[in-house]
Amino acid sequence: MTYKLRSEEWFRGAIDNSFQHRSAMRAMGHVPESFVGKPMIGIFNSWNDLNSCNYPHKELVEFVKRGVLLAGGYPIELHTITTPADFMKPSDLPYRNLMAMDVEESIRSLPIDGVVMLCECDKTTPAQLMGAASCDLPALQLAAGHRTPGVFRGKTVNYGTDTWKYIDDYKAGLLTDEEWSELEKCISCSVGGCPVMGTASTMKSVSEMLGMMLPGTASIPATHSGRKAAAEATGQRIVEMVRENLTPSKLITEDSIVNVMKLLSALGGSTNAIIHLTAIAGRLGIHIDVNEYATHSAGVPLLVNMQPSGEFNMDDYFRAGGLSVVIRELLPILNGDCLGATGQTIREIYSKVQAEVSEVIHPLSEPVMEQSGIAIVKGNISPLGGILKLSACSEHLLTHRGPAVVFDSYEDMLQRIDDDNLEVDADSVLILRNCGPIAEGMPEWGAIPIPRKLLREGIRDMVRLSDARMSGTSYGTIVLHVAPEATAGGPLAIVQTGDIIELDVPNGSLQVLLEQSELEARMAAWVRPTPKHVRGYPKLYADHVLQASEGCDFDFLRANSKEEAKFVPPIVGRG
C-alpha cells in the first residue's frame, strides 16, 4: 500500500520552507537523514508533578520511543496540559476541553503523521480522544496503569471507593483520629490511577473497546513490567497504523459506540463515561441521545465484581484476565465486526482469549447482578433527563417519595449538612443545585454526603439528586447530571425544601409533586444567578459549554455532521 507522509510537506516541501524546518531540527540534534521519509510520531505526554495518576509516563515514554524506532518511525515527544483530578478546582471537567484543544491544535499545526497519547487520570483519556478524533490522524493511547492497593490494619484498602467509605466511618465516630491519620499514609501508596472501576479504569476500557488502545493493555497495573512492554508495542503499532492509514473515524463508529454502551453496563462503569463518550462521538459528527445509554445497556448484566459495584479491585481484575475476558464474554451481544487497534475485528481479537471466568469476572450466563447499566429519569424537574448508575444504587430506593432538603450551592451544603439541627431523615431527598457545567464546571459534588446525624444511626444511602457529577469510584442512589442545570434555568432551580420528590426508576420518572401553575409561578419569579467570571477561560467555558446530555463539549468544537467533522490541515509556509 502506498501512503503519503503528512510531515514531508514540512521537510520535503518548498525549498525555503523545508530548509528552515530541517535547520530547526538540526539545532536540536535531529539529523534529516534520520527522520525525513519516516513516519513522524508525536508522543503526547501528560505527566507533571501534581498528577500522580499519569506520573509513570515520565518513564514509559522512553519505551514508546523505542517501539517507534524499532518499527521504522521517528519519535517526537510533546507535552500538553494535564488534568490531575485530585487537585484541579473546582472541577477538572472544564480543562478536559482545554486539553482536547491543546492536543487537536498541536496535531494540526505540527509535522506529525501519527500520534501516541499517554493517558490515565480521569479527564486525560477523553480529552486526548476528543482531540485525536477531531484531527483523524492515526492515533493510539497508552495508559499509565492503576496504582497498588494499600493495607490498613491487615485489610486491603483501595484509593477511591474505600476513601468515601472511611470518610463516612470517621464522621460517624467509628475511626479515631489516630486511625484516620494512619489511613492517610497507607491508602494510596504508589503512582497510577485508582485501583477500582472508577472513571480512569472505565475510560481506559472505553478506549480499548473503541480500538484506540492496544488489546489487553487497559488493565495492566502501573507497577507491572507489562506496562513497559505495552509501551513498546504501542510505539511499534502506531507506525504500522500510519502505513495502513487506520484512523479514529474508522474505529469510532456508531456500532463501536453501541458496543461501549453495553460494555459500560457489564463493567459497572463510571457515569462520567456518558459525558465523555457523547463528547468524543460529537467530534466525529455522531450525536448520541442520552436515552440511547439506557436503551443499549438494558438487559446487559453486571459481569465484573469490583468496587464500587462489587468487592474486588483492579489487581484482582488483572489477575483474572482483565478487560479481554469481559469483552470475550460479551461477544454474543456485541457487533463483532468493529475493528480493534490491531486492524482485526474485535471478534478475531477477543475470541482467542483463554483466561477462565472467575469470582471477579463472571460469565454472561451467571452475572454478578442482573440489573446494571444506566437508568434515565425525566420529569418536571429534569426535562432533558438525569442519570443513575443502577449497579451502585440501593434497590429499595429505586422507587421512593420524600421531602426535599435543598442546598443552593456547595458552600451551603458544607455549612449545613452536618448540623444536628438540620431537618432531615432517611426518607428525605437531598438536592444540590447550581453545580452544573455553566455554574461551576460540573464538579464531582453530586454524591452529597450523608448527614452526620444519620450516619450515626447507620444510614449509608439516601436518594440524592444534583446537576453535578460524582466520582466514578462513588456509589449510592444518586440522580446525576440533571439537565437543564439550575443555573441555566432548569426546573431544578425552583424546587424548595419540603417539596415532595417522587423517584420512579422502573418507569423512568423524576417529579416534584406540584401543580403546573405553581411551577410556572415559581419560574416566573426566578432570577438567574450573576456569573462569577467576567473574563478568562472560565468565562469562555460558561459561555460555550453544552449541557451534560450533550457531553459538556464546547458548542464550537462539536461537529454538526460527519461532513463538518472533516479535518482542515494548515497551510505549510514560512515560519
Image: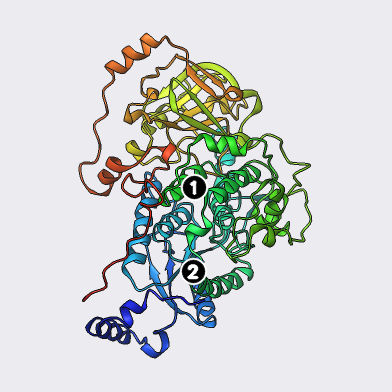
Q: In the image, residue 267 lies at what x, y percent?
A: 64, 46
Viewer-proximal residue among 361 and 183: 361
Q: Which residue is mark 2?
A: 245
Query: Which picture quadrant has residue 413?
Result: top left
Is residue 149 left or right of 480 when viewed as pictured? Answer: right
Q: Nearer the viewer, residue 457 or 308?
A: 308
Q: Quadrant of the C terminus?
A: bottom left
At mark 2, the secondary structure is: loop
The image quadrant that residue 426 belongs to is: top right
Kind of residue at badge 1: Leu
Residue at mark 1 to residue at mark 2: CA–CA distance: 23 Å
Identity, as a three-letter code, of the amino acid under mark 2: Asn
> On the image, numbered disc 1 is attached to which residue?
277
* Residue 111: image location, x then y, percent: 35, 74
Asked if disc 1 and disc 2 are in contact, CB closer than 8 Å, the reply is no
Tag 1, which secondary structure?
A: helix
Q: Nearer the viewer, residue 23 or 133?
A: 133
Depicted 241 relative to depicted 157: above or below: below
